[in-house]
Amino acid sequence: MPLSPGQQLEYIAYLVKNCQKCPLYKSATNPVPGTGNPQAKIMFIGEAPGFYEDQQGLPFVGNSGKLLDKLLDTIQVSRSEVFIGNILKHRPPQNRDPLPEEIKVCTPYLKAQLKIIKPKVVITLGRFALDYFFPNESISRLHGQIKEIVWQDLPLTIIPVYHPSAGLRNGAMLKALQNDFLTIGRFLKN
Ligand code: URA
């Protein structure tokens, strides 16, 4: 019998748990493979686990996650219906930016997750997730836009937004995030 999407995601989580393709596993407490509905229509992709995510092994459970929850509330979407993942599955020390080599060896897990879940809509949170689909594009230009693409034979609607942590630091970015979520909400209604 073929594995169900949930079982396939568990297998990816197992591979992530045992991953030693870059040194981040040495300083991390827990892997954060991502979590949510294996058949989600909407997938959120962040950057990398932070302190609390590393402690709990779950994505977006710290301050950025609390803001993400509020933004989800505004569009009446619950965590249980989406999948939330990251570009990197282990926390970089002191939350530094992901390195190109780390992104290169880690994103095959994300690619596998996307191919298992086959979401219709992907919301990229921040510039590293944007860069995965649109290399060398600027988030200040693309945020809030609805981009229809075919990625690896998969038709995807990508809606890039600023990272919630940017919204926590800067009022203008928070406003932009709130606005972009209104766009997402309207898009999902249609
Ligand atoms: N920031 C991210 O990009 N991902 C998380 O999981 C938490 C914070």
Image (cartoon, rainbow, N blue to C red):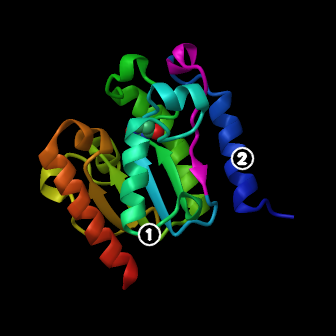
Quarter location, residue 40? bottom right
**Quadrant of the frame with the C terminus:** bottom left
- Residue 28 within the magenta-colored segment of the rendering: yes
In space, the residues marked 2 and 1 are separated at their CA atoms by 27 Å
Disc number for residue 10: 2
Name the residue furthest bottom.
Answer: 190
Q: Secondary structure at mark 1?
A: loop
What is the magenta range?
A: 24-36
Q: In the image, what residue type sits under mark 1?
A: Gln
In the picture, measured across the screen, residue 70 lies left or right of residue 161, that is right
- Residue 143 within the magenta-colored segment of the rendering: no
Q: Residue at x 32, y 69 (%)?
A: 184
Q: Is residue 112 visible?
A: yes
Q: Position of residue 155 (x, y in %)?
A: 43, 72
Precedes in sequence: disc 2 or disc 1: 2
Q: In the image, what residue type sits under mark 2?
A: Glu
Q: Residue at x 18, y 58 (%)?
A: 142
